[in-house]
């Protein structure tokens, strides 16, 4: 990929336009297509796509061999050029084009009113309801590199990449309908040649089940090619002699559906999406196997045509910027995600227990969210292994800050599950430790807090030695990212089942278990879910938590958003801030977001040394911080470049 441009982020707005057509009425169709083009442009689209053979209608049949139709098409092409001269955009529209070899089913590319390229359909369906070889020749049969239109030689072929003249990362590849159904599609090769956005001009008829298949196909093609894939199809006004068309348009990005049109509408349908070019470039650079696959093509055999595709100069509005990127918005998918996470945790722990040839686990149970989730994982793992539940040793270790509520929840949880429960107060031991090192117990500083965390860890490991078991860790991904853990305290364990799960997900996984539990366990878990997040390392007031984590480090919902965009996509702080102001517009103002973003960046850089020696644990999602897996970063990296625009 090319070097990045100077702007902090790049989004491109795509529109798919399904116009009303009258089959064979070229003037009418041209007018309707232009109407859609101008409407899409007015709404900020700078790549505008119209269906296969939109100028003539896909179902024109033997009229494709008629001189009158082709004369009208020639005039239509001139009109489209004249009417779009003032548009700083790239427009792709389908039309039949006569060549010396025969008629091609072409995707015509206009930039600032000039016809700059034609991409022929390569694979012509000629089976079942399709008869395209009756009228057209495929791109394989037209090896000429140009087509003459009005005395001008126009580049022609599926070997063309249309690149923005100012930012070569905005690169468009085009194919036509059937092409994407092939085992090796033109768009696959175009992506390997550098196209980040792929367009498909289609005329896909409807039969039962085809819409779902089509959607899966588009999503998977965008994922495999690490691209944006925009698919536009003709609508209900095509001839219904034998088949019906629905106008199904789809825009996917890197395996996710961004926008989908309504089907079977009788009016013009325009669908928009804002594509994140930086995401695509980052993922391609990171995925070295993508580059390995480029041996399939010779980049020199692909031609480049310069076009104008300006990035949007405002915030992206035609894509969902969710405040909880680790959680699917679809409730059905959310249930599946939480189910998968829990099963990954359970499978990881079960394997580690088996391989260590141990039958006991030791876990510190505080009554908080993280330790509760780790405890539930232990319970399920033992159930799968067929081990006695008494071999799970839950140890509650009240300290100076422990409240009655959390302690009682820990006890109730262990008793309800039928595991071994032991209470060991850390207060006497920590007071002795303070005396040994000369610390005033009234001074509730880091020494006061960290001594408790380390003492608890010492108790857990010594109990593990005593019982012949292993210590199961409870710290989560968010705490790792922020360094919100005590080095050689809760930072360490024999196996940490929560290490790959951000705080916002921990809650949902516990909720998932709660929803499938009996009434007694559900009540305990509900109370835990409603308890403020706290390490409880400072003395409470009136038995109420005084040390609330989010008051100190910031809201976890913000930090998890920052983690996702910083680690998963390598986004700049400026871009993260911009996206966060969209996602959290109803929750936090920009000043607040900027403050916590600055704190996050500083803490993330400042605590890599803790992550460099973190415990083993399973990766559960696209973001992980294990130094043995996804994240390798110098422990003494300089944060200056990342915070200079946040202070």
Image (spheres, rainbow, N blue to C red):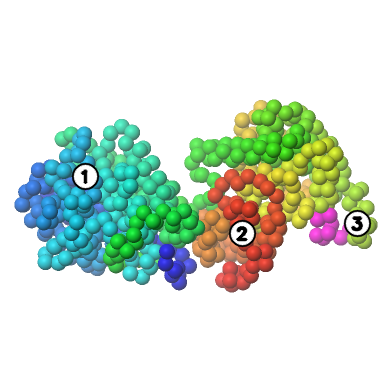
How far apart are the two marked residues, 2 and 1, measured between alpha carbons? 48 Å
| Residue 124 tag number | 1
Q: Position of residue 4 (x, y in %)?
A: 45, 68
Q: Position of residue 445 (x, y in %)?
A: 82, 60
- For the stretch drawn in magenta, the main secondary structure is helix
Image check: 462 left or right of 228?
right
- Locate residue 133: give its quadrant: top left
In the image, residue 413 above or below residue 52 = above
How far apart are the two marked residues, 2 and 3, measured between alpha carbons? 37 Å
Q: Residues within 10 Å of mark 1 (few under 14, many from 20)?
A: many
Image check: 246 left or right of 580?
left
Verify whether residue 443 appears in magenta: yes
Q: Quickly name the residue at label 2.
A: 632
Say what secondary structure mark 3 lies in: helix
In the image, the segment drawn in magenta is 442-451
The residue positioned 56% from the left and 59% from the top of the image is 566
Which of the image's four quarters has the C terminus?
bottom right
The residue positioned 81% from the left and 52% from the top of the image is 454
The residue positioned 30% from the left and 44% from the top of the image is 182
Q: Quickly name the residue at label 3.
A: 434
Q: Position of residue 259 (x, y in %)?
A: 38, 48
Q: Position of residue 582 (x, y in %)?
A: 50, 57
- Locate residue 207: give its quadrant: top left
- Locate residue 365: give its quadrant: top right
């Amino acid at each position: 990929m090319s070097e990045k441009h100077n702007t902090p982020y790049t989004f491109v707005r795509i529109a798919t336009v399904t116009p009303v057509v009258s089959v064979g009425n070229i003037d009418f169709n041209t007018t309707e297509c232009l109407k859609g083009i101008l409407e899409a442009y007015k709404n900020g689209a700078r790549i505008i796509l119209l269906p296969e053979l939109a100028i003539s209608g896909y179902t024109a049949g033997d009229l494709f061999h008629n001189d009158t139709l082709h004369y009208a098409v020639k005039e239509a092409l001139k009109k489209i050029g004249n009417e779009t001269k003032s548009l700083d955009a790239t427009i792709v529209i389908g039309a039949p084009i006569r060549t010396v070899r025969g008629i091609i089913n072409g995707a015509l590319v206009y930039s600032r009113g000039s016809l700059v390229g034609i991409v022929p359909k390569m694979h012509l369906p000629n089976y079942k309801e399709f008869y395209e070889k009756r009228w057209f020749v495929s791109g394989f049969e037209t090896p000429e590199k140009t087509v003459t239109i009005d005395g001008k030689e126009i580049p022609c072929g599926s070997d063309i990449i249309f690149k923005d003249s100012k930012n070569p990362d905005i690169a468009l590849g085009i194919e036509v309908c059937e092409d994407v159904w092939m085992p090796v599609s033109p768009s696959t090769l175009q992506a390997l040649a550098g196209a980040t956005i792929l367009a498909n001009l289609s005329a896909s008829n409807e039969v039962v089940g085809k819409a779902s298949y089509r959607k899966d196909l588009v999503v998977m093609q965008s994922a495999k090619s690490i691209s944006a894939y925009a698919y536009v199809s003709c609508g209900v006004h095509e001839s219904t002699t034998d088949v019906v068309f629905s106008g199904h348009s789809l825009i996917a990005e890197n395996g996710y559906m961004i926008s989908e049109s309504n089907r079977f509408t009788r009016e013009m349908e325009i669908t928009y999406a804002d594509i994140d070019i930086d995401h695509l470039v980052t993922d391609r650079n990171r995925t070295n196997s993508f580059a390995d696959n480029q041996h399939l093509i010779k980049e020199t055999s692909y031609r480049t045509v310069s076009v104008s595709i300006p990035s949007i100069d405002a915030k992206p509005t035609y894509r969902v910027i969710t405040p909880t990127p680790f959680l699917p918005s679809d409730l059905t998918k959310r249930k599946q995600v939480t189910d998968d996470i829990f099963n990954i945790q359970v499978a990881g722990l079960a394997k580690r227990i088996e391989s260590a040839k141990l039958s006991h686990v030791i876990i510190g149970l505080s009554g908080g969210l993280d330790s509760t989730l780790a405890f539930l994982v232990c319970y399920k793992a033992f159930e799968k292994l067929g081990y006695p539940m008494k071999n799970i040793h839950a140890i509650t270790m009240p300290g100076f800050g422990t409240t009655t509520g959390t302690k009682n929840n820990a006890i109730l949880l262990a008793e309800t599950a039928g595991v071994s429960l032991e209470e060991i107060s850390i207060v006497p031991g920590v007071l002795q430790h303070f005396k040994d090192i000369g610390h005033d117990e009234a001074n509730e500083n880091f020494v006061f807090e960290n001594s408790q965390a380390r003492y608890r860890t010492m108790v857990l490991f010594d109990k593990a030695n005593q019982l012949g078991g292993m210590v199961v860790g409870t710290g989560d991904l968010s705490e790792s990212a922020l360094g919100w853990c005590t080095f050689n305290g809760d930072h360490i364990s024999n196996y940490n089942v929560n290490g790959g799960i951000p705080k916002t997900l921990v809650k949902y996984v516990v909720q998932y278990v709660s929803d499938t539990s009996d009434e007694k366990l559900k009540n305990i878990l509900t109370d835990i879910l409603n308890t403020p997040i706290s390490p409880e390392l400072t003395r409470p007031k009136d038995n109420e938590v005084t040390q609330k984590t989010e008051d100190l480090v910031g809201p976890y919902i913000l930090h998890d958003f920052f983690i996702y965009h910083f680690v998963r996509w390598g986004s700049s702080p400026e871009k993260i801030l911009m996206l966060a102001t969209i996602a959290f517009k109803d929750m936090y103002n920009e000043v607040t977001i900027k403050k916590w973003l600055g704190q996050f960046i500083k803490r993330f850089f400042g605590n890599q040394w803790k992550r460099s020696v973190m415990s083993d644990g399973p990766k559960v999602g696209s973001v992980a911080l294990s130094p043995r897996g996804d994240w390798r970063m110098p422990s003494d990296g300089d944060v200056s470049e990342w915070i200079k625009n946040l202070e």
